[in-house]
Image (cartoon, rainbow, N blue to C red):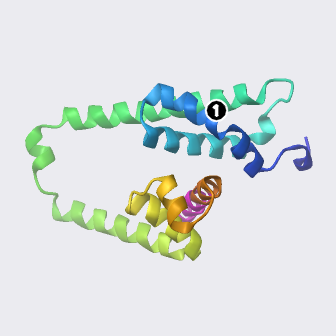
Amino acid sequence: MSKEEFPSFDKLLNSNWDYVYNYLLKKTSNKYISEEITIQSFSKAFEKIKTYNPKYNFKTWLISIAKNTYSDYLKKKKLLYKDVNSKKIENIVSELSPEESMINKESYDNLNSKIDELKPMYRDMIKYRYIEDLSIQEISKKLNQPINTTKIKIFRAKKLLSEKLKKND
């Protein structure tokens, strides 16, 4: 299929957001987690849009991506929980070694410098969403923008930041 045969990302997001979000909300019972997984699902769908077969229902394809993204989230959460549970409480509470502290500071500084390299609009989106921990609705109100525009900008900001961080690896 040629690129012209696919609807724009904005159109796909606007017409299917509620469907995917509500599906995930039923699974998670958590608005924040549902929102995050929905954003990730649309990101994956947009990246893999050329693999979509039009003889199947588009919403079914989107839900399968959301279902797999949610499954990945649960696996990561389970591994994190398992890692924390496997350590003794003293180890969790104990202070980091000087080496670990230095590595954490370097990672934090690297992340901040990559965020600062983003265009101001995207830098603000990352800071509002992940540093100030504002909801998409709060960001939308703060910037006086439609919610879907805010979602798209957050998606793009995350993607740009991810690309910048991958260049360092």
Residue 126 lies, with reference to residue 25, above or below; the image says below
The local secondary structure at tag 1 comes to: helix
Residue at 86% across, 24% down: 55
Does the magenta stretch mainly form a helix, a strand or a loop?
A: helix
- Residue 49 lies left or right of residue 129; in this view the side is right
Above or below, 151 against 56 in this view is: below
Q: Position of residue 142 (x, y in %)?
A: 50, 66
Residue 152 percent location from the top left of the image: 64, 55
Of residues 98 and 152, which is closer to you in this image?
152
Residue 165 shows in the view:
no
Quarter of the image for the N terminus: give it. top right
Residue for point 50% across, 61% down: 139
Could you say which quadrant of the image residue 7 lies in?
A: top right
Residue 120 or 48: which is nearer the viewer? 120
Instruction: Name the residue type under label 1.
Output: Tyr
The residue to which callout 1 is attached is 19
Q: Does the image show residue 80?
A: yes
Q: Which residues are magenta?
A: 156-169
Report whether 12 appears left or right of 44: right
Nearer to us in this view, 44 or 97: 44
**What residue lies at 16% left-to-right and 60% top-to-bottom?**
97
* Neighbourhood count class around disc 1 (C-alpha, 10 Å): few under 14, some 14–19, many 20 upward: some
* Left or right: residue 145 compared with residue 55: left
Find out whether residue 133 is within the magenta segment: no
